[in-house]
Image (cartoon, coloured by chain):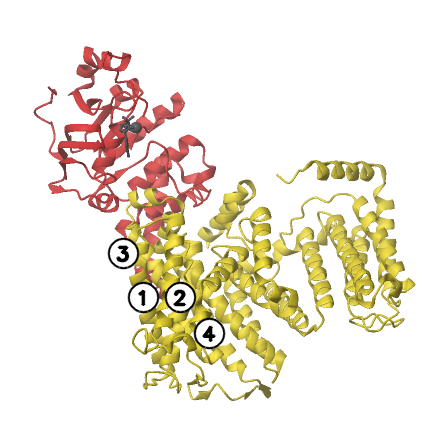
Amino acid sequence: MSGSGVTTARRRLIERARGRVPATTARAAALLGAVLSLASTFLAWSYGSAFPGNLTIYGYPGGAQVYVLVLALVAIVLLLLEVSPLRRVLAPGGAGGAVRVLASGVFLVTAFTVLAIGVELGGLINVEWGGWAALLAAAVFVVAGRLLPDDRPAVWSYRLPDWVEFLIIALVLGLALAAFVEALAIPEWEIFLCFLVALGGALTAAWRLGLVSWISEVGTRHRGVTVTAAFLVAAAFPFTQGSDNHWLNVMVNVGIFATTAIGLNIVVGLAGLLDLGYVAFLGVGAYVGALLSGAAASTIGWNPPFAVTVVIGAVITAIVGVLIGTPTLRVRGDYLAIVTLGFGEIFRITVNNLDGSTGPQVTNGPNGIPGIPDLKFLGIDFGQSHTVFGMNLGYFANYFFLELVLMAFVILVFSRMNNSRLGRAWLAIREDEVAAQAAGINTFRLKLLAFALGATLAGMAGTIQAHAISSITPDSYQFLNSAFLVAAVVLGGMGTVTGALLGSVVLLLLPEKFRFFQDNKLLIFGVTLVLVMRFRPEGVIANKRRKAEFHEEEISEELGREARAEGAR
Amino acid sequence: MTATVGDTPHKPVLRVSGVTMRFGGLTAVDGVDFTVGEQEIVGLIGPNGAGKTTFFNCLTGMYVPTAGQVIYRGTPLSGRPDLVTKAGVARTFQNIRLFPNMTVVENVKVGRHCRTTVGALSALVRGPKYRREERETEAQARELLDFVGLADAADDLARNLPYGDQRRLEIARALASDPGLLLLDEPTAGMNPLETAQTKDLVFKIRDRGLAVVVIEHDMRFIFTLCDRVAVLVQGRKLIEGSPAQVQHDERVIAAYIGTPAGSEQQA
Ligand SMILES: Nc1ncnc2c1ncn2[C@@H]1O[C@H](COP(=O)(O)OP(=O)(O)O)[C@@H](O)[C@H]1O
Ligand SMILES: [Mg+2]
């Protein structure tokens, strides 16, 4: 599949060189490269101090140098591990592959930094000798890494005492939060990019060691603990931000987007119905929330308690879902996508026209509803910052926690439906609609259920969104946003909760970090989608079944093993 | 014109009268009368393109017949496949139609769908009813896999089953809906002689569970040793119906298969 002529030729070249160089020599060379790379981070790389991280100081790694240092250090540890008696336990398949990945990471970060210094400070003349030395060291490291003996795929199948495994789960999730917070705190895009490269390298290396699959196995073994811990860690996020609202605000938006994406994943991922107008349901919920918020611009004077608003929002979106689904779900496949796209636009245009001149005055038309007051719910004023556990949190923390609760609910709905006769029926419809109907499934009713359920969840998210963003207009619910939701689901992985989450986080956070992304959103998303579809069509975090569709052999056994374990339980 | 066996030996499970299916100018099924008694195994044979699959599609609601009536145990079947299955008529397909990316046992569980009732709310709260039903579904699915001889493959993906096993899985899925009548469309197509023999035993076992079975097949030896009665369809019409011995030696049948001036050897 990926074996184009050039890569095969290159691979053959590497194979031949690898055969000629003894493993010990290759290991020594790699060790040398790693040590030199590590040492180079203590040099100055740049003459100008304007480059992010100020790389003009000797003896004190700064900016992206830190990532080189960490990657090199890990590589050194792994190389020493390979020759130590611990190898059998910790790197049963060998660490060659992991070291190779780390070397690539070191090289990429170093080369990018040196180049960026040249570009940003006006010419490569600004690169100090330390920078060139670092590049050389990295090059040695990469080449030596290529010569390392190929490792076998490593299988970690350790079963530790439960409490140790719980600790590991907590540790991994804690580290994830730390890395996330660290990443958010990086102001310069250059360093952020290096961070992403380094993180990617580290994760890939861990995966090559067999660590990633082992940890996910541990996580699956203690699913309840993992899920609880994940929510606790997510709930800890506001405490890393203190009273600073900026990232909390962003994360509230990410949360709403992700919740909506998970709802959409029921429709797209489970039932296989491509809905390109899904954001309209978020819009219906948001308008219900706004109209019942007591905002001055609202045409409805009634301001019920928020719990009532959520229920009303859910009911109305469910009704709208059924109304839209009843005609549209009679068509299949591509036609359904086009028809839902049309209905999504109908929503936006209708809201635009309910402005008192082209229709009855309900929504203020294109002006939308501004000045939506902050929530008052459970006796808490969401507009005020509160002190929790002795820490003063920005007021967006309130929305963050509420959003987290809703997300938990949506995830619960997703997974419980998935594991019921309804979920099986959805999967069956997705697999073969004719056979599903012949097996006794009322396909239309089941599809309508998925559609309406997805709509309801989006509507609930909408009621919160209206308050969180305090001003809504019809244009927030245009087709583009539906496309982004679908993109999040497809990129992250259809049919999985984590996939939809990851897709949402990436899609919403990257533009915050890179101006270039913000300005060329569509271009980047387009390119990314094409790349993902080409190289990993099942999405980043794949549902086992989806993965099986594209890479059959490896998966089915895994799935079977899991199912047997489930049965034994 | 058509020779009918006047007295069906058992009480009829299925009574089809005058079913006709036209596609534009083509009459694929032409005024077919057909009855199936309790625990009877009836064969349906005929050259390719004779309209056998179309006839099944008319019985199972996949097509709404242009004319005629299908009555199962006294009630007319409506034109929707899921309702037909719910009424008690299950089928398999000539071209296997499994849910390839679901496990074998999940495929069978899907067949239980119309005999289970848990709704969204119950699935969400996982109350006692949900748990009981899931337990029963699991047990019944495993029992059926055992019955067709696929118990060991229960947790494999359906797509990874060998061809013959896929056909058996399709039968298990059909059986999961507790049908009174099972329609098998070429269940041994592509099978080796051993698998064909196993399938024959399986059909007998299914009959012994109390079901009536209609089998479409091209393998004459299979049909004539399996069925209580055989009907021959040629160009949409029922040519003859009778015991295997009667049909086997009928000249018209032989002519239809070898090819007659009428040119009934269309490709399906
Ligand atoms: N949906 C359809 N539309 C048009 N013609 C059809 C359709 N289904 C079947 N036919 C035609 O009906 C005839 C009988 O087909 P079929 O029932 O598949 O035959 P058999 O199963 O006996 O081999 C064929 O000529 C076929 O082309
Ligand atoms: Mg046929």
| Separation (CA) of disc 4 from disc 3 | 30 Å
- Mark 1 or mark 3, whichever is nearer to me: 1
Question: Which color has been applied to chain A in this rendered view?
Answer: yellow
Secondary structure of residue under mark 4: helix
Label 2 belongs to which residue? Answer: A280
Give the residue displayed 87% in from the left and 64% down from the top. A127
Contact between marks 2 and 1 (CB within 8 A): the answer is yes
Q: Which mark is residue A320?
A: 1
**Do dots 1 and 3 share one subunit?**
no
Give the residue displayed 59% in from the left and 55% down from the top. A528
Q: Is residue A479 above or below residue A384?
A: above
Choose the circle earlier in sequence order: 2 or 1. 2
Choose the circle earlier in sequence order: 1 or 4. 1
Contact between marks 1 and 4 (CB within 8 A): the answer is no
**Circle 2 chain:** A
Label 3 belongs to which residue? Answer: B117
State left or right for residue A542 relative to residue A18.
Answer: left
Q: State yes or no: Cβ of the residue under disc 2 lies below 8 Å from any atom of ligand 1.
A: no
**Do dots 4 and 3 share one subunit?**
no
Which image quadrant shows ligand 2?
top left
- Mark 2 or mark 3, whichever is nearer to me: 2
Amino acid at dot 4:
Val
Q: Quadrant of residue A316?
A: bottom left
**Circle 3 chain:** B
Which x, y percent locates residue B116?
28, 53
**Circle 1 chain:** A
Q: Which mark is residue A405?
A: 4
Count of numbered tags: 4
The N terminus of chain A appears in which quarter of the rendering? top right
Which x, y percent locates residue A81?
79, 54
Tell me which chain appears red. B
